[in-house]
Image (spheres, rainbow, N blue to C red):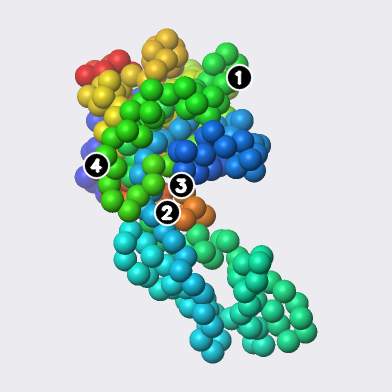
Amino acid sequence: MDEFKEKLEKKLFDVEHAINIYASSCCTFPAECIYDKNILKQYENIIKSCHIYMIGYLSKATLIKIEQEDTKLKFEYKISGCTQFTYLDLPENYTLFFDDTGYYVRDDKGHKRFIPEEYINAELSQYLEFDVRYIGQAYGKNGNRNALDRLLNHETLQRISLSKKPENTTLSLLLLKVEPNTRLITAINPFARNKDVDGIRIKAGLNKLFNTSEQELISLYEASLIRYFYPQFNKEFKNSFPSTNLKVLQDCYNKDFSAVFAEINVEGMPFKIGSEKVAVSHEHCVPHYLYDDLKRKAFFYGE
């Protein structure tokens, strides 16, 4: 406790604020599908609100067959060139069937049930990886452009598609919807050198909460993920922080954040996410601490 108190006493302010940004939903599909209107139709509602996109290589998975073994279903997949088996417990009196609609189970009363997609995704995510190679954003004026608008005429996507890809992978897209409602994390330190007796720093935090725009959040989120995942094809961002919208980040600089936390969670998707630099996981929390002016300048303007 003495050591912890000593650290707190070194802090300048007793009230510090950090902004927390996260993706509230996402969708994924092979890159070639951006030209297939029928496939995109099923993602229409979420695509129009996705302003962040990731281009990467997704492990290939092919379902070979499903068999019933007593009260279990046995799934055989070919994943990244290797055979993998997963199992699902069946309720009593259920039997596996296959017809033109695909695999399904039926009980002794004739009730038909399809195999839950959530189960399949959870099982596949043990083996499949989304390898991030590029991160970008599209916003336009007042959010009138989405990620797909940008990708349809994207030179980097075309360049990546012509590059040699890893074996047993598919060039894929992951589109993210950044939650537009700001989350603010406030730390109160009673041992700091300067006390906020007039509440100015508390009020400043509330101003950050209500006056950080959706466009600013998206730019901060994109740039945070670029620095964290260090994608191969983000050459202009590899050794510096700036996003595609420097003016937006300059406005954010004046808000004096103590830290920015960017979160991404792909639980429910049939893969884990990572990069050449970052190990794969369902969830990543990207912290950027900005306690002094030099760190803040590196954060917003590059090192």
Q: Residue at (61%, 30%) from the top-left corner?
A: 48
Q: Position of residue 34 (x, y in %)?
A: 52, 34
- Compared across the picture, whether 254 is left or right of 7 comes to right
What residue is shown with label 4? Answer: 277
Between the C-alphas of marks 3 and 1, the distance is 25 Å
Badge 1 or badge 4: first in the primary sequence:
1
- Which residue is denoted by mark 1 in the rendering? 144
Closer to the chain start, of discs 4 and 2, is 2
Asked if disc 2 and disc 3 are in contact, CB closer than 8 Å, the reply is: no
Give the label, 3 or 1, closer to the camera. 1
Q: Earlier in the sequence, mark 2 or mark 1?
A: 1
Judging from the image, what secondary structure is the residue with disc 1 in? loop
**Residue bearing the label numbered 2:** 271
Q: Amino acid at mark 2?
A: Phe
User: From the image, which quarter does the C terminus lie in?
Assistant: top left
The circle on residue 265 is: 3
Relative to 65, does residue 242 appear above or below in the rendering? Answer: above
| Amino acid on which the number 4 mark rests in the picture | Lys
Question: Which residue type carries mark 1?
Answer: Asn
How far separated are the C-alphas under marks 1 and 4?
33 Å
